[in-house]
Amino acid sequence: METMTAEAANRIAYRVAINTKPILTFDEACLYMGMSKSALYKVTSNKEIPFSKPNGKMIYFKRADVDGWLLSNMSATTTELADKAMAYTQKKGGKR
């Protein structure tokens, strides 16, 4: 069995820390979301994701806001759509 190098252990500890920190730096947010820096710069410049710039330079994100943004605009499953369609047709049919 291989032993873990100190570098590998540090990388794992860093990733665990990112997943538990309430506030993320720009680089941490990129790693957390799996986005490139240019992609994250684009969504921040378009003000599509909530962020804070307390000193006008460094960008910070609330992890909860990032999670909410990542889960926004969810697509309904086929079952959910079928249920909505059934409820809609029954409601329309009941008014006749």
Image (cartoon, grey):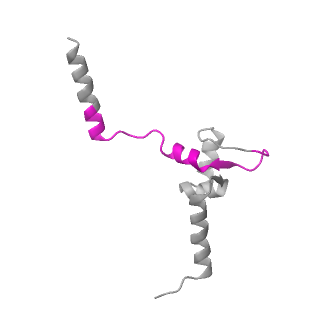
Residue that sits furthest to the bottom in the current view: 1
Which residue is drawn at the image coordinates 62% and 38% (left, top)?
A: 46
Residue 87 against residue 46 in the figure, above or below: above
Horizontal placement of 69 versus 23: left or right? left
Q: Which quadrant would residue 29 be assigned to in this image?
A: bottom right
Q: Is residue 72 magenta?
A: yes
Residue drawn at (70%, 49%) of the image: 59
Q: Please state if 81 lies on the left or on the right of 17 as rendered.
A: left
Instruction: Name the residue furthest right.
Output: 55
Q: Residue at point 68% right, 49% down?
A: 60
Q: Position of residue 41 (x, y in %)?
A: 64, 47
Percent across and percent down for residue 8 are 58, 77
Q: Is residue 6 above or below residue 26?
A: below
**Residue 45: percent from left, percent from top:** 66, 41
Give the magenta-colored segment's residue range. Answer: 54-83
Q: Is residue 73 above or below residue 66?
A: above
Of residues 31 and 87, the one drawn nearer to the viewer in this rendering: 87
| Residue located 63% across and 38% down the image | 47
Q: Is residue 43 left or right of residue 90?
A: right
Q: Quadrant of the C terminus?
A: top left
- What is the quadrant of residue 24 in the picture? bottom right
Q: Residue most toward the top?
A: 96
Q: Is residue 31 above or below residue 96?
A: below
Query: Is residue 6 one of those drawn in magenta?
Result: no
Q: Please count the marks in the image.
A: 0
Residue 21, given in percent of the width and then of the height, sits at: 62, 57
